[in-house]
Every structure is written in C-alpha cells, then in structure tokens.
Amino acid sequence: MEWFKSLEFAHKGFFWALLLIPAMVGWYIWKQQRLYGTLSVPVIKGFDLPKKKLFTKMRHSGIVLRCLGMIMLIVAMARPQSSLSWQDSTTEGIDIIIASDISASMLAEDFKPNRLEAGKNIAIDFIKNRPNDRIGLVIFSGEAFTQCPLTIDHDVLVNLYNDIHNGMIQDGTAIGMGLATAVNRIKDSKAKSKVIILLTDGSNNAGSIPPLTAAEIAHQFGIRVYAVGIGTTGFAPYPVPTPMGVQYQRIPVDIDEGTLSKIANATGGKYFRATNNQALQSIYSQIDKLEKAKIDVTQYHKKTECFFPFALLGLVFLLAEFISRNTLFKGALT
C-alpha cells in the first residue's frame, strides 16, 4: 500500500480510457439479455429450478478477466513511476565569535537578573536560532581566553556559555585583549563571512593591546565587528556583599561608546547600545538579520518506471480470458 501511494503517473490522460470499462460491461449485459431472453410466468410451482452448476456460475468470468486486463493495460500506459527524492543542503556559513565581558561591573542589576546573566540568556537564544553557523566564545575581564572555539555543536557551546561567571579570571576590562583573542580564533576561517560580537559595559583599563589596534587587525583579516555597549544611562544598582547581607550601591555607567563606535566603523560593523533586556534582545535580532547564511538546497528526484508489472498482469488477465473463452466456455457469448 505504501508503495502504491508513492506512485506518480507520467501520462494521466490515459485514465480517461477507463470509461470504456463500464461501456464494455453494459454491452455484455445487453448481449446476454438478447441471447437468452426472459420468461415470465404467473406461477412457479410447476417448475423445478435446476441447481446452478459451477460451469454456469463461471460463465461470466470472461468479462471480468477482460475488464481487469484492460484496466491493468490502461494503468501501464499511464506510465506509473515510483518517486524517490532527497535534498542536498549547502550552507555558505558564517563564523561568529561572541566576545563577552565578565568583569565585576557586569553584575550590576540594571538588567534582570544582572548584565552578565541577561547577556548570556539572550546570546544563547541567538545561538539556538543559527544552527548552520559555527559559533565560538571568548570571555575577557582583566585578561582574555577562549571558552569555546568555533563549533557547530551548539549544545556544547551553550553548556560552556552557561558555566561562565565573574571571577574566572583577573578583574578589569581588557577590551583590546578580548577583541584580539577573538580575532586570533577566527582569522584563519574559510567561511564566507567572519563576525565578532563584542559585548562590554565599560572602558578599556587593562591588557597590553589597545582596542583600536585590535580593530585594525580585525579589519586586515576581513572580520566584521558588531560592538554592543550594555548598561543603562546614569547610575546602576550594584550588589555589594557585607556582613549584614547584600547591600546595593549606585555605580556610574561608564561605557566608552566612542571607542566602541570606532571599532565597529573600522571593521565595517555597527555599534549598538543596550539599556535593558528588551533592547539587548532587539540588538541580537538585528544582528541575526544582518548576518544570514545563504543556504543552497538542491532537490534530487529519482524516478523508476513501474509499468511492467501492470502490463504483465494485464496480459495475463487477457490471456486467461482468451484461453477460457476458447476452451471451457467455447460457444458461450462472453
């Protein structure tokens, strides 16, 4: 049954010939009535109806075989074909490195639950929506290192992203070092497009590489940088552990937007400012639209001709009808 459902017909117009079948049956019935006629009597008690023999019951088998044979031949002429199809997807992928600031200031709670966790959650959603791209993760504070190299295994990447926290490395904000580490991880990529998403809430105050120098290196390797400044305007609540429990201080938001804009412009990217969770999510959505991989899908079809079984069955039915008409039922009208 499944095999029959997969059949396609190259010449469906031949199915109009099936209208000949009821015409053949009608002609046969009309001939039978003319040959044998009918007899009507008012009483049947005087008649002993003979029991029908097998020969009598089978005398109409000729027309059945003839109709079946014609149906099979019509189906064969319609050229039934089994269709096997599959597709080949070719992704001209994009390689993306997310360079995330994990300095102490990222614990400020102007984002919910804080800047670091909000950045992680929204970035993870971004990763899950790009299954065809290789994505990696670099984290930086007073220094920088690669948390996850470029990978298509996004489950591993997400797990490693969930594990990052403040205090993993020396505190500070080494934007230049974070960007340079990301560049080093992606520079040899053969992808059609190479992108770094640089996320920070401060100004460069650590590391041996100036941010603009790292941006120039990125430009030389054809890497586009989308810089994101994360933090509200003015002051933000910052949790401070004390013997009396967590106390909150209001700390000034100090994002070096000028440098981040220059980094983005120097590499052909764009600078964004996120002041809350919704704005950050919108920024990732914009980057997602700006950096879309081109996927070429080639559809393959393999068709196999299946007319032979139908043609063979049709000939078998017609041969059986011919033999029965000229042997068992010779002389009977079929």
Image (cartoon, rainbow, N blue to C red):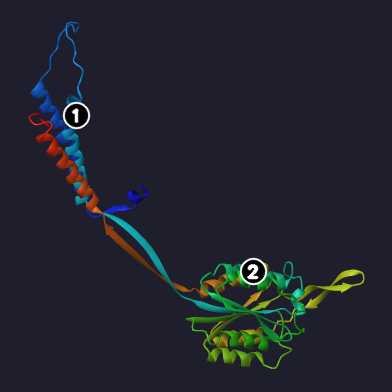
- Disc ID at residue 122: 2
Q: Quadrant of residue 330?
A: top left
Work out whether residue 106 or residue 96 is closer to the camera in this orientation and state it: 96
Residue 316 in which image quadrant: top left
Question: Which residue corresponds to mark 1?
Answer: 58
Can you say whether 279 is above or below 330 in the image?
below
Compared to residue 72, the image places residue 101 above or below, namely below
Q: Secondary structure at mark 2?
A: helix
Residue 202 visible: yes
Residue displayed at 67% across by 88% down = 177
Q: Position of residue 53 (x, y in %)?
A: 19, 22
Residue 68: horizontal and vertical position, in percent?
21, 40
Q: Is residue 1 left or right of residue 172?
A: left
Instruction: Name the N-terminal-most of marks 2 and 1.
Output: 1
Q: Nearer the viewer, mark 2 or mark 1?
A: 1
Query: Foreground residue, 141 or 106?
Result: 141
Image quarter in which the C terminus is found: top left
Q: Position of residue 250 (x, y in %)?
A: 82, 75
Q: Identify the residue shown where x is 12% and y is 23%.
A: 33
For this rendering, which residue is in front, 169 or 285? 169
186 sits left or right of 246 in the view: left
